[in-house]
Amino acid sequence: MFQLLNQPYPLEENPWVRLRRTALIGLFVGLFLLIFQPFGLQLWRTDYKAAKILGFGVITAVMTAGSYFVPAWIWPAQFREERWTVGREIFWVTTNIMLIALANQLYLNWLIGKYTHPFGWLGTILVTYLIGVFPTGASVIANYIIRLKRYAGEAATVPVHAVHPVAEQQTRPLTLTAENGKDTLSLPPACLLYIESSDNYSTVVYLKEDKLAKTLLRSSLSRLEGQINEPDIVRCHRSYLVNLELVEKVTGNAQGYKLHLLDGQAQVPVARRYNESLIARLKELS
């Protein structure tokens, strides 16, 4: 069980997708409460009842948005997909459910003008957690299994690519220039493995005399991408450019595909938006 909780799990990093999801969750909660009026809401007599009930949906959306964006802004290193696991996802979703329950309890107290003792809040949070943790855990694990089968199965259809790097003297060199215009790196395109972005710097990883070499350039990844005019050196992730010609095999986990280069010495992730195009191109190259 603990091994399963430590397995990689996809973390949605696109802010617009998160906002749409937040809005849909809030809309669902508000409309559900308004239409079915459970928990005695149908007996509630008050002015502007519909608007007040929809307020629960608004609070749900605000709390969900806060859980998406605030912690990731405060602790960005903890909210990177390479560190996200099944256990973290379960913990984070159930924590969000408890915070929503607490916020809605406070909102309800404000609406009816009734003070609830803190121990009552603790009870509400505990009950919410116990109710929410099991369906949340089951949902996350089911999604993990579905994604794992999908990506691992598709990766298995990509043939192993026999890589034969071109000798350095036989190719026209590719020159990458840093932002200062002085620091440069020239190398044959066929020897470039990948480029990884890190804040204002990019690490160029390449073959030099058949050995792995790295050079750090002060430049954004997008800027270096604009200097490359090679059809098979492409973006595969917001932080990576990769040379598809040197990809030896593809594996998959719940987060997506991994590209393996140089006998597994290097592994490069593939963002989900690039999945179909990269897999199709790799099948053509194999």
Image (cartoon, rainbow, N blue to C red):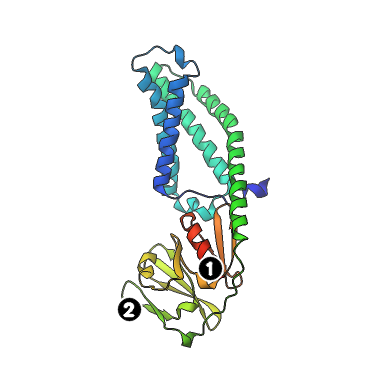
CA separation in Å, label 2 and label 1: 38 Å
Can residue 63 be seen in this snapshot? Answer: no
Is residue 249 left or right of 187 when viewed as pictured? right
The quarter of the image holding the N terminus is top right
Is residue 156 left or right of 52 when viewed as pictured? right
Residue toward you, 249 or 10: 249
User: In the displayed structure, would residue 46 be above or below residue 136?
Assistant: above
Name which quarter of the figure residue 34 lies in: top left
Residue 135's x, y, as percent? Answer: 59, 34
Query: Mark 2–mark 1 contact, CB under 8 Å?
Result: no
Residue found 50% across the figure and 18% down from its top: 39
Amino acid carrying mark 1 in the image: Glu
Residue 167's x, y, as percent? Answer: 51, 85
User: Callout 2: few (<14), some (14-19), or many (20+) C-alpha neighbours within 10 Å?
Assistant: few
Residue to which mark 1 is pinned: 284
Amino acid carrying mark 2 in the image: Lys
Residue to which mark 2 is pinned: 182
Residue toward you, 175 or 231: 231
